Image (tube, rainbow, N blue to C red):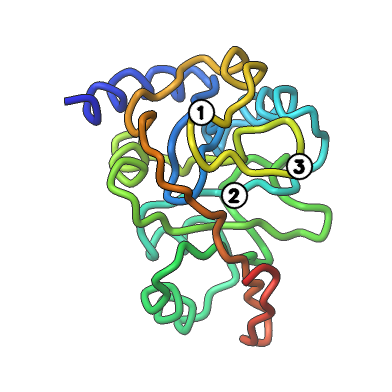
Amino acid sequence: MLFEQDIKNALPILENGDLILFPSDTVWAIGCDATNKDAVEKLYLLKQQRVPENLVVLIHHEQDLLKYTRQQNIRTFDYIKGVHHPTTVVYDDPAGLAENIIDLDGTVAIRVVKDDFVSSLIIQFGKPLLSATANQEDHYYPCMFSEIENEVLNGVDYVVKYRREETIHHEPSSIIKWNTDGSISILRP
């Protein structure tokens, strides 16, 4: 099955600190090991950016939040379980991640994925993935494989074959900020 073969092929690439191109639970994305500073630098070079904007740490389960942020609030788990659209949450006080993905304001964006392929990849990799939209320009999101620029296709070390033929128009995630006082700010509905 293509699903399992892509995971098998992607794992050594991620373990080596290199980049993959994959269909996420939202749009197509460039991914790497979110705990590896050198891998993150490679992603920055391909994206032609120097700051950690529009980067999202992908995790498999809500409980993984306990490993990657010290901003802990039990209401976070209930909120994440209750949303049906992929939702990225911006947290203060990240932990256990590559330092070069932490924003200048000390925050990090994390999303619990609900996609079987990405969840399986994260579980088998044993670490979170850093995800960035599969483009070099910030004005569009590649919602389908056919929309990805050649520079990105040629700039990664492995391109997942699974879901390339899809014609469903996927949307980026919603983004909220989980404030230290427990309130929520909606950054992108």
The total of numbered circles placed on residues is: 3
Q: Position of residue 146 (x, y in %)?
A: 51, 28
Q: Is residue 122 above or below residue 62?
A: above
Tell me the quadrant of the picture where the C terminus can be found.
bottom right
Residue 129: percent from left, percent from top: 49, 40
Please name whichever residue, 102 or 22, is drawn nearer the observer in this view of the structure.
22
Reading the image, the residue beneath label 3 is 138
Which amino acid is tagged 2? Val
Residue sitting nearer the eye, 140 or 167: 167
Q: Earlier in the sequence, mark 1 or mark 3?
A: 3
Find numbered disc 3 in the image and state the secondary structure of the residue it sits on.
Answer: loop
Helix, strand or loop at mark 1: helix
Residue 11 shows which numbered tag?
A: none
Identified at 43% across, 38% down, the residue is 23
* Dot in front, 2 or 3: 3
Q: Name which of mark 2 and mark 3 comes first in the sequence.
A: 2
Give the residue displayed 31% in from the left and 41% down from the top: 117
Query: Where is mark 2, residue-wise?
Result: 56
- In the visual, does 24 lie left or right of 179? left
Instruction: Determine contact: label 2, label 1, CB under 8 Å.
Output: no
Q: Amino acid at mark 3?
A: Asp
Disc 3: CA contacts within 10 A as few (<14), some (14-19) or many (>=20)? few
Residue position marked by numbered label 1 in the rendering: 146
Q: Residues within 10 Å of mark 2 (few under 14, many from 20)?
A: many
The 10 Å Cα crowd at callout 1, few under 14, some 14 to 19, many 20 or more, is few
Q: Position of residue 110 (x, y in %)?
A: 55, 57
Label 2, label 3: how many angstroms apart (C-alpha)?
Answer: 15 Å
> How far apart, in angstroms, are the residues tagged by discs 2 and 1?
22 Å
